[in-house]
Amino acid sequence: MRYFIHLAYNGTTYHGWQIQPNASSVQETLENAFSLLLGEAIGIVGCGRTDTGVHASDFYAHFETEQELSDTELTQLTFKVNSFLSEDIRIYRIFVVNDDVHARFSATARTYQYHVSNVKQPFGKDFCHRVFYKPDIELMNQAANILFEYTDFTSFSKLHTQTATNNCTILYARWDMVGEEYVFTISANRFLRNMVRAITGTLLEVGRRKLSLDDFRKVIESKNRCNAGTSLPAKALFLTKVEYEGVL
């Protein structure tokens, strides 16, 4: 039987989603909890691999077991896992899916948000990147629209990764003012490692007029990570939506 887990986590104290030697990860924490409560070794596959310090308000994972759990048992398991885990991980629900539904490969789109502020945020500083200038949001949105013209985002990818291709299809990209924060929302069919933080950092260079729109286009076309802006801190990045067509 294959089961999906719908969850959220604060990534501050974790070295990303994926299991790593000598480092705490969300995946390992969940596998330990589910293995203990189900009485067998449980391997969990996530919908993505968020980096160290990145958060997820909408995340899916799956696991397999020969145990056929009823809806009532799944509700009880959700309660038990939540009781077992610390406050920084929450399981929304656990539900059965068909054997061919995969948490990672069946996902059709993912959405991230990055939070920026140019004023002090006493209660949001741990989840927001502070800048000391006023970005031109209209200019940044003009640059964000340029992303739709391309599919190869090598310039925004972490170097020396093992991905087969650096091609992605951007589905949505826009800056909005939410209270005192500049929030960048971006959706795509897939993302490269560090891609969102690198794009956001480069767009801010446009917003402070250090890069022109033509410069931004040239950065993409160069396919050279060294030409793009700084990769911004992980603390302000959230995976906010994962989509599955005809599955959930």
Image (cartoon, rainbow, N blue to C red):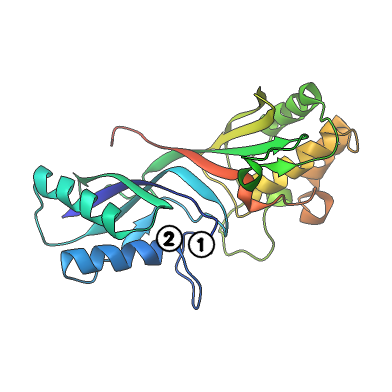
Q: Residue at x 86, y 35 (%)?
A: 133
In the picture, measured across the screen, residue 157 lies left or right of residue 138, that is left
- Does 244 sit above or below residue 17? above
Circles 1 and 2, Cβ within 8 Å, touching? The answer is yes
The residue lying toward the viewer, choosing from 36 and 145, is: 36
**Residue 167 screen position, x and y as percent:** 60, 46
Tell me how far mark 1 sits from mark 2, CA to CA. Answer: 6 Å
Q: Is residue 225 visible?
A: yes
In the picture, measured across the screen, residue 224 lies left or right of residue 90, that is right
Instruction: Tell me the number on the disc at residue 14.
Output: 1
Indicate the quadrant containing the N terminus: top left, top right, bottom left or bottom right: bottom left
User: Mark 2 is on which residue type?
Assistant: Val
Residue underneath mark 2: 26
**Secondary element at tag 1:** loop
**Secondary element at tag 2:** helix
Indicate the quadrant containing the C terminus: top left, top right, bottom left or bottom right: top left
The residue lying toward the viewer, choosing from 58 and 49, is: 58
